[in-house]
Image (spheres, helix red, strand yellow):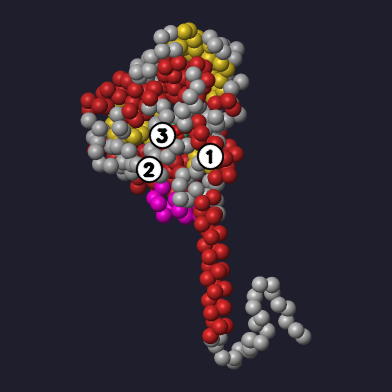
Amino acid sequence: MGRARTRGTEDDSDVDRSPDAAPASGPTRRRFLRGALAGAVVVAGGMVWRADDQGVFAPFEGPAFEAWRSSGESGTGALAAATVLAASAHNMQNWLLHLTGSRADLFDDPRRSLGAVDPFRREAHLGLGCALANLELACPPSGLSGQTTLVPSATEPELVATIALTQADARDDDPLFHAIRSRHCDRGPYPEEAPGQELLDHLARTASAGSEGVEVRWLTGGHQLDEAGALLVDAAEIVVADEAMSRDGFAWFRTTPDEVRRQMDGLTLDCQALPALTELAAKMLPPVSRQRGDATWVQMTREVHTATARAYGLVLAPRTDVAARLRAGCALQRLHLALTSEGWAMQHLNQAVEVAEREEATGRSPNIADRLSSLADGAEVIAMVRVGRPSGRAARSPRRPHPLVLV
Ligand SMILES: Cc1cc2nc3c(=O)[nH]c(=O)nc-3n(C[C@H](O)[C@H](O)[C@H](O)COP(=O)(O)O)c2cc1C
């Protein structure tokens, strides 16, 4: 029976394929090599295409990152454009905005939540405070003066702030405003240089200006850094061992470019500042599992985040008071903007506060809560950060463009 011929191959019907036939030679061998080469090119091409599609050669790009470019808008449009560039826990962007010529209303969006990671919505409110700081900073350059009232309505808890807007001379001289588009969370290894006390004092004052009742306290000495680092590593291990915390946190991880494109929020691989080979593997292989993501996070916490923290900032404020949370969020955002404008980097590190609240929510003994409180000499810690010189690996995170958050 004649053998079928494949289209595009030369006539090889006369090639003896029996096991004891002589090895292919001459034209047959060249044909084989040509075929192998073509196959390799196709496979490599496929890998390059997949690598390119996965953002291996450059960070993820596209409409989810457009918000970082200057929109060129003025007036209330510029306020909205600045607001959405704020930090938020797990990049959940739980904000909604209602804007008129004379008023900006900032709402919490409770559909965006961290579940067991944020049982009392403290982090959600801190993120809204960050958004409020950007909104307020954007007023003077737009020729507006803003007068903020926090938690203005007892019957509408989702309305967290109202800013009365009036016309004013445009002013564009605040370095914090100018840092809004270049501020990014830096999770990479910080170089050895530690910030001096004078700078830290200046940063603490700048951060808490306008945030009554909020204090930024620094931990700098070797012993303090070790103690805070050990607490953060232990808390990270507790988070990943807690099924609900691990699951609810991982829900905000976006492991493929397609997820980033569709959802425009959450934590991306680019933002983790992973070692180059780990990042390459994470992008080339099937999407990272929760277990692998958790293990990598704990490892990064131990080997990078805490090992290269040059100072920790403790933000002190009452954790259960919504207005205090909003003021503390403003302070966090202003701190990060001030650091950015001075050429320094920051990473929020909140697992110890998250575990302290989880202990409370589940009735467990307050082990991490007690250690956190003793780190602050008994004061109430609402948030924690580390600072240092930039790693050079901080990447932009996705954002929903401001028209999507207007109500
Ligand atoms: C209240 C709050 C808590 C946060 N907690 C952490 C944290 O524990 N670890 C971390 O790496 N980033 C944390 N972040 C940073 C966010 O993940 C980050 O702001 C978000 O992904 C957006 O990225 P960007 O700040 O670079 O724009 C926190 C941010 C806020 C506002």
Q: Is the C-beta separation of discs 3 and 2 under 8 Å?
A: no
Q: Given the image, on which type of amino acid does mark 3 rest?
A: His
Q: Residue at x 61, y 20 (%)?
A: 407
Q: Nearer the viewer, mark 3 or mark 1?
A: 1
Ligand 1 - quadrant of the structure image: top left
Name the residue beneath numbered marker 2. Answer: 393
The magenta span reads 274-285
* Label 2 CB-ligand 1 distance < 8 A: no
Q: Which percent across, then down, holds residue 259?
A: 58, 42
Q: Residue at x 45, y 47 (%)?
A: 58
Few, some or many residues within 10 Å of mark 1 (<14, 14–19, 20+)? few
In whole angstroms, how far apart are the C-alphas of marks 3 and 1? 18 Å
> In the image, 362: left or right of 303?
right
The answer to which of marks 1 and 2 sits earlier in the sequence is: 1
Q: Which percent across, then down, holds residue 235?
A: 42, 39
Name the residue beneath numbered marker 1. Answer: 62
> In the image, 127: left or right of 109?
left
Pick whichever, 267 or 80, lies toward us. Answer: 80
Q: Is the C-beta separation of discs 3 and 1 under 8 Å?
A: no
Name the residue beneath numbered marker 3. Answer: 184
* Label 3 CB-ligand 1 distance < 8 A: yes
Pick whichever, 31 or 168, lies toward us. Answer: 31
> In the image, 293: left or right of 210?
right
Q: Identify the image quadrant of the N terminus.
A: bottom right
Q: Given the image, on which type of amino acid does mark 1 rest?
A: Gly
